[in-house]
């Protein structure tokens, strides 16, 4: 397997890795960062990604295969720009790629593209998922076959503009002493055509059972949801954005509520941090990105991975990024 904490590939910039095991290989679905010389801003205008590549690896060799471009924004009628963090779920003998992008009005929506193979190429649907909004879709298939989509991101991801339940172009974050903006979850219909119902809030509680506050920037949700199950518990992990940490909360249902537990990954080089967690041949791995290769340029990121370990009580050992 590729050496840990080193770039999976170096000839393109990759970010936002969603890793899954299909057919005994790890498939990684990243964003493909587009290098340019524009400025960074709080709206995320620097993240100008136009297509997706798929990467795969196994533990028989250190080779990482780049399966090439599997979907381009020009193929997707409803998209204007910014193909951000994607994910894939396998259901109905089909690999469904979920992705966010801005529509023709400049608002983020979630789309679906399909393939018979995990490495693509993926054929996009003509329309986005009805009633979808914001960014960072994470797909999770539970043991009973139910598919859940977790999503949402603040600032450029527009999640705070939906606090009232409908889109408010002037919507802002809550006051610091109000509960935080919650990420969303929706079940997909069995044919994966649309949400079964209006997306629900994922509520995250502190150790006293109180909702995390908007001012609690070390622990509140910002973007980058991921769901995995370990020993029957649901682990909801995410990025804290402004404090640049990957943290997690646990619960007894895929719909929450979840109780905050601690840090998974300390800050990396670069503003954003984004992750996924996958089990492969009895070991658990964290996939993440950083900006080491580009010397700290925020929109030129690189996907890496490292092993993730649990304590006997089910807590996750915090990882401090290392550089080779
Ligand atoms: O890649 C663009 C955005 O940066 C993602 O949607 C966020 O999670 C952050 O990684």
Image (spheres, rainbow, N blue to C red):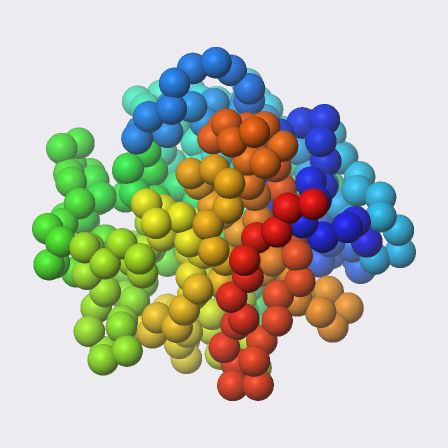
Residue occupying image coordinates x 34% and y 74%: 259
Horizontal side of residue 29 vs 165, given as left or right: right
Residue occupying image coordinates x 55% and y 41%: 290
Q: Which picture quadrant has residue 250?
A: bottom left
Q: Is residue 215 visible?
A: yes
Residue 134 image position (x, y, % from top left): 34, 40
Residue occupying image coordinates x 85% and y 48%: 62
The image shows residue 14, relative to residue 324, as above or below, that is above
Camera-nearest residue between 43 and 176:
176
Q: Residue furthest top?
A: 37
Camera-nearest residue between 89 and 256:
256
Q: Which residue lies furthest to the right in this view?
A: 60
Horizontal side of residue 132 vs 94, given as left or right: left
Q: Can residue 18 be seen in this view?
A: no
Residue 145 image position (x, y, % from top left): 56, 68
Marker count (numbered): 0
Camera-nearest residue between 259 and 89:
259
Residue 11 image position (x, y, % from top left): 72, 26
The image shows residue 315, relative to residue 140, as above or below, that is below
Q: Residue furthest bottom?
A: 313
Name the quarter where the C terminus is drawn.
Answer: top right
Residue occupying image coordinates x 22% and y 44%: 160
The image shows residue 254, relative to residue 108, as above or below, that is below
Horizontal side of residue 246 vs 122, given as left or right: left
Residue 267 image position (x, y, % from top left): 46, 50
């Amino acid at each position: 397997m590729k050496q840990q904490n080193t770039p999976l590939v170096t000839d393109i910039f990759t970010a936002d890795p969603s890793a899954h095991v299909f057919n005994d290989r790890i498939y990684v679905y990243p964003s493909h960062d587009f290098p340019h010389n524009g400025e960074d801003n709080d709206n995320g205008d620097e993240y100008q990604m136009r297509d997706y590549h798929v990467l795969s690896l196994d533990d028989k060799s250190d080779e990482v295969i780049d399966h090439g471009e599997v979907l381009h924004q020009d193929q997707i009628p409803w998209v204007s720009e910014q193909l951000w963090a994607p994910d894939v779920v396998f259901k109905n003998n089909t690999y469904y790629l979920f992705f966010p992008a801005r529509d023709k009005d400049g608002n983020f929506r979630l789309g679906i593209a399909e393939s018979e193979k995990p490495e693509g190429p993926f054929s996009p649907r003509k329309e986005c998922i009805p009633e979808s909004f914001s960014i960072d879709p994470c797909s999770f298939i539970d043991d009973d076959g139910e598919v859940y989509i977790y999503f949402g991101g603040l600032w450029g991801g527009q999640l705070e503009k939906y606090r009232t339940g409908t889109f408010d172009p002037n919507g802002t974050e809550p006051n610091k002493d109000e509960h935080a903006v919650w990420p969303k979850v929706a079940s997909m219909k069995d044919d994966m055509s649309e949400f079964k119902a209006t997306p629900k809030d994922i509520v995250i509680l502190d150790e006293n059972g109180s909702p995390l506050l908007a001012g609690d920037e070390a622990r509140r949700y910002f973007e980058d949801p991921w769901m995995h199950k370990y020993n029957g518990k649901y682990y909801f992990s995410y990025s804290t954005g402004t404090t640049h940490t990957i943290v997690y909360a646990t619960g007894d249902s895929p719909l929450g509520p979840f109780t905050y537990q601690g840090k998974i990954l300390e800050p990396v080089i670069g503003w954003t941090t984004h992750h996924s967690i996958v089990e492969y041949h009895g070991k658990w791995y964290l996939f993440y990105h950083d900006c080491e290769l580009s010397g700290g340029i925020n929109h030129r990121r690189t996907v890496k991975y490292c092993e993730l370990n649990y304590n006997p009580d089910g807590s996750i050992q915090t990882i401090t990024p290392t550089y080779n």
